[in-house]
Image (cartoon, grey):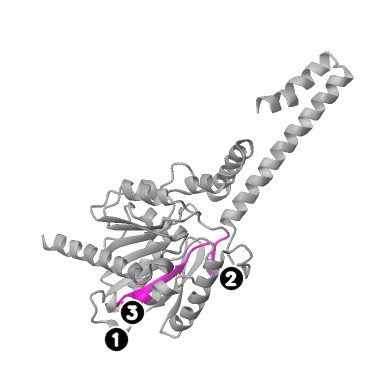
């Protein structure tokens, strides 16, 4: 930056009083051109990173699978089959006006044949991941329905069909989930859920974790389950560009943060999953794939270690890549989740008893 200012201001002032030799002038003009080109490149790269991270996700985006691993594509095929089953069950398309946007989601009422299970009366709010417009959490929804829960699946802002120009990568609008819980209560008449659990995957995991230490977290949220969530969007951003040369990486990251600050309103002081779990009292279960290269497993361990909740659990799933823990763990995935929820409900019952 000093070199740039010197070339832009100091040298012209000197030239006005003491003209430089032609050879030196050509060199300085060349240096100025290089510096301007470098800054232009860095700003363009930063803008590209910003757009890649927060550009609105549309349903058409799911058609591009050129860079999707084969294992993930196989999982998508399984999900597509399960979606046929899921959407043959009773469900309602909901929308609400909130914060100047139209937000949408799908509510699946509890099924009558499962109303006698130990989780009857509970509602699972199942939150999708970054750019997920495939309804990829269909399998989780089915598992919760079969266990006796009603289920609500919000489409996060910035993801079609909800409104919003940008994806909320920094979980700035986490309280959208609280607004949806209010909607569930309002629309349930006399059959309002007796408790809620928040279950998030990837960016959805970061979102539910960021609610964990919030003063406005509803008291009837009994547990939070987070699979492969990041500790903060800053740390995740640094991880994603780790392969760049430092001379490219640092300025690009600086300018990207500038775009996030100016356009999205993000600040370094904003709550993050890491700072929020440190204030949490709600039971929290953190799951992470051991072979996750998108969100590194140490982030999951870091979140667990920082968590202030008395009841917490960390499960590192051997052999699982990003968002593939359910596929790898199979039936154990649901079993361990339900066991954790049951323990959380037991603790809540014991506390009320005292």
- Mark 3 or mark 1: name the one nearer the start of the chain: 1
The structure residue drawn at horizontal position 46% and vertical position 62%, both measured from the top left corner, is 323
| Residue nearest the viewer, comparing 60 with 271 | 60
Q: Residue furthest front?
A: 319
Classify mark 2: helix, strand or loop.
helix
Question: How far is disc 1 from disc 2 in space, using C-alphas?
Answer: 34 Å
- Quadrant in which the C terminus appears: bottom left
| Residue nearest the viewer, comparing 208 with 81 | 81
User: Looking at the image, is 307 positioned above or below residue 117?
Assistant: above
Q: Is 322 displayed left or right of 43 in the figure? A: left
Q: Is residue 243 magenta?
A: no
Residue 144: % across, % down: 34, 74
- Quadrant in which the N terminus appears: top right
Q: Is residue 152 magenta?
A: yes
User: Looking at the image, is 109 positioned above or below residue 261?
Assistant: below
The structure residue drawn at horizontal position 70% and vertical position 28%, both measured from the top left corner, is 4
Q: Residue furthest top?
A: 18
Classify mark 1: helix, strand or loop.
helix
Q: Which residue is mark 2?
A: 59
The structure residue drawn at horizontal position 45% and vertical position 56%, both measured from the top left corner, is 291
Question: How far is disc 3 from disc 1 in space, using C-alphas?
Answer: 9 Å
Q: Is 199 displayed left or right of 340 in the figure? A: right
| Residue nearest the viewer, comparing 165 with 199 | 199
Q: Which residue is mark 3?
A: 146
Mark 2 Cα-neighbour bin, 10 Å: few <14, some 14–19, many ≥20: some
Q: Which residue is mark 1?
A: 113
């Amino acid at each position: 930056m000093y070199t740039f200012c010197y070339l832009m201001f100091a040298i012209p002032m000197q030239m006005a009083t003491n003209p430089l030799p032609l050879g030196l002038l050509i060199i300085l003009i060349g240096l100025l051109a290089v510096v301007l080109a470098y800054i232009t490149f860095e700003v363009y790269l930063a803008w590209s990173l910003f757009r890649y991270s927060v550009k609105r996700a549309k349903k058409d985006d799911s058609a591009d699978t050129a860079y999707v691993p084969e294992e993930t594509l196989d999982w998508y095929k399984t999900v597509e089959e399960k979606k046929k089953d899921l959407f043959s069950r009773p469900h309602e398309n909901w929308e609400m006006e909130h914060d100047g946007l139209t937000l949408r989601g799908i509510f699946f009422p509890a099924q009558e044949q499962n109303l006698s299970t130990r989780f009857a009366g509970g509602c699972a709010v199942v939150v999708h991941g970054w750019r997920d417009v495939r309804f990829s959490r269909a399998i989780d929804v089915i598992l919760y329905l079969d266990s006796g829960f009603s289920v609500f699946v919000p489409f996060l802002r910035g993801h079609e069909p909800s409104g919003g120009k940008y994806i909320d990568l920094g979980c700035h609008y986490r309280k959208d989930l609280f607004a949806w819980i209010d909607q569930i209560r309002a629309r349930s008449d006399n059959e309002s859920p007796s408790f809620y659990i928040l279950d998030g995957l990837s960016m959805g995991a970061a979102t539910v974790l960021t609610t964990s230490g919030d003063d406005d977290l509803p008291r009837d949220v009994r547990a939070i389950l987070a699979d492969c969530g990041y500790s903060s969007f800053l740390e995740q951003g640094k991880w994603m560009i780790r392969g760049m040369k430092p001379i490219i990486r640092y300025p690009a990251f600086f300018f990207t943060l500038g775009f996030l600050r100016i356009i999205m309103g993000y600040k370094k002081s904003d709550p993050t999953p890491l700072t929020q779990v440190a204030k949490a009292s709600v039971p929290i279960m953190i799951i992470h794939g051991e072979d996750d290269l998108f969100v590194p497993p140490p982030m999951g361990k870091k979140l667990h270690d920082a968590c202030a909740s008395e009841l917490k659990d960390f499960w590192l799933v051997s052999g699982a890549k990003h968002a593939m823990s359910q596929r790898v763990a199979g039936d154990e995935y649901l079993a361990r989740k339900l066991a954790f929820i049951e323990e959380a409900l037991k603790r809540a019952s014991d506390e009320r008893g005292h």
